[in-house]
Amino acid sequence: MRFFTEQHKYYCGCDLHAKTMYLCVLDDRGKIVLQRNIKTEPEIFLQSIAQFREDIVVGEECMFCWYWLADLCAREGICFVIGHALYMKAISGGKAKNDKIDAHKIATLLRGGSFPIAYVYPPKMRATRDLLRRRTYVVRQRGSMITHVKNTFAQYNLPDPEQNISRKSERDGVAELIPDESARRSVRLDLDLLVFFDKTLLGLEQEIVRMAKEHDADSYARIRSVPGIGRILGLVIL
C-alpha cells in the first residue's frame, strides 16, 4: 500500500456525497482554516478553496461519485489524491462518525503522510470499464436463472435434467420434466429470461470489445496473444 507523503501548505479533506460535500482544510501546522458543507457544484468548490490554491492537495475517499472532482482538479491544476476506502477505514476507524469528522480525518491523514492512495483511473477508458463491470451484474443475473431451474428440480426431488441449460440448444423440453403446472411455468419463465440474457450479453460483449480496440487495439491484441487469456479476461486486464 502506497501512502501520500508530499508536503503542501494546505490539506483539504473532502467527505463527498451525491449532492453535498463537506470540506475541511488544514494548514501545515494542523490548524483548521476552513470547515464548510457545500453543494457538489464545481464553481462553489473552487470558490471555497480559492484562497488556498497556491499550494493545496485535495483528498477524498474512494466512492461512487469521485469522477467529477478528480477531473475538475486535473483541469484546474490542483493536486488530487483518492483514498483506498478499506485501508482508510482500518487506519482512521472510530466510534464517532459524521461528515465533519470524516472530512477532518481525511485532511489529517493527508497531512500526516498516512493517507492510503488508490488509483485514479484515467477518464478515457473510465466509462468502458464501468460498462464491463455492468456486464458482470448481468452475468450474475443469468447465473441466478440457471440456479433457480436446478433448485426447482431439487425442490420436487426430481433428477437433474440431462441437458446443459447454459446452452440454448439444450433447453427444449426441460420445463416439461416437471409435473406441477405452476412449477413448470416458473421454469419456463427462467428459460425465457435466459434467452433475453444470452442475446443481451452477446451484444454487450461485442460492443465492449469494439470500444477496447478503439482505446488501445495494440495492447488488447498483445493481451489476447497470451495462452489462456480469452476475450473477457483480456478486457478485464486491459
Image (spheres, rainbow, N blue to C red):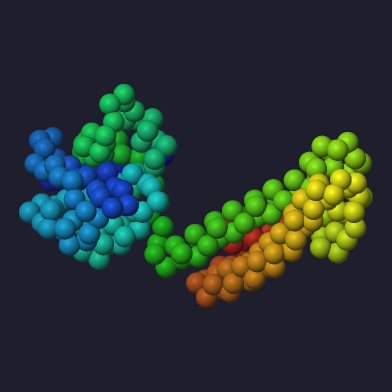
Which residue of the protein is positioned furthest toward the top in this rendering?
Answer: 95
Q: Position of residue 215 (x, y in %)?
A: 50, 72
Q: Residue at x 42, y 68 (%)?
A: 124
Q: Is residue 21 above or below residue 86?
A: below
Q: Position of residue 184 (x, y in %)?
A: 83, 50
Q: Is residue 4 above or below residue 42?
A: above
Q: Residue at x 21, y 53 (%)?
A: 39
Lateral position of residue 226 relative to residue 92, left or right: right
Q: Is residue 202 above or below residue 11?
A: below
Q: Is residue 108 above or below residue 126?
A: above
If the image is split into quadrants, where does the N terminus sit?
A: top left
If the image is split into quadrants, where does the C terminus sit?
A: bottom right
**Along the line of sight, which residue is nearer the eye, 130 or 55?**
130
Q: Is residue 209 visible?
A: no
Which residue of the protein is positioned furthest toward the front in this rendering?
Answer: 181
Find residue 2 and report its image quarter: top left
Q: Position of residue 147 (x, y in %)?
A: 75, 45
Q: Residue at x 21, y 64 (%)?
A: 76
